[in-house]
């Protein structure tokens, strides 16, 4: 039994799933802020609207970083699968060479 608690970062798949959940939460937050911006505009609350626009800008930047992180995690998953497939094929190739040498 492991003493360490399992985390979303125990493997690449878990990390990818966690980042996907962050992206969903970020999307919800962005939609909420856009609604707040519209409401502030209707109410004539200019200072509040400007603050919300700054929030929206920072959420957009964060969304870019999350999207980039998801792509990097996808690349890492693909590379790991490729490397594991090569490692699995390596013993077969060695057996073929050995059987040819013995023939």
Image: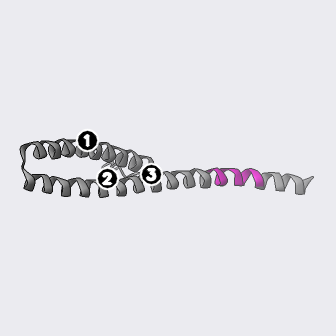
The residue at 41%/48% (across/down) is 16
Element under label 1?
Answer: helix
Coordinates of residue 38 in the picture (x, y in percent): 16, 43
Mark 1, residue position: 28
Residue 17 makes an appearance in the image: yes
Q: In the image, is 19 to the left or to the right of 73?
A: left
Which of the two residues, 63 or 41, is positioned nearer the viewer here?
41
The residue at 33%/48% (across/down) is 6
Coordinates of residue 87 in the picture (x, y in percent): 65, 54
Mark 2, residue position: 4
Mark 3, residue position: 12
The residue at 36%/49% (across/down) is 19
Mark 2 vs mark 3, CA separation in Å = 18 Å
The residue at 33%/53% (across/down) is 63
| Sequence-wise first label, 2 or 3 | 2
Dominant SS of magenta comes to: helix
Within 10 Å of the Cα at label 2, are there few (<14), some (14-19), or many (20+) other Cα atoms? few
The magenta segment: 85-93
């Amino acid at each position: 039994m492991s003493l360490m608690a399992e985390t979303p970062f125990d493997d690449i798949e878990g990390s990818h799933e966690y980042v996907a959940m962050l992206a969903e939460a970020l999307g919800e937050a962005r939609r909420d802020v856009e609604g707040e911006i519209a409401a502030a505009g209707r109410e004539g609350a200019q200072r509040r609207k400007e603050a919300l626009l700054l929030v929206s800008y920072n959420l957009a930047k964060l969304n870019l970083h999350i999207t980039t992180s998801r792509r990097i995690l996808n690349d890492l998953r693909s590379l790991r699968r490729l490397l594991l497939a090569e490692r699995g094929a390596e013993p077969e190739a060695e057996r073929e060479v050995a059987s040819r040498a013995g023939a």
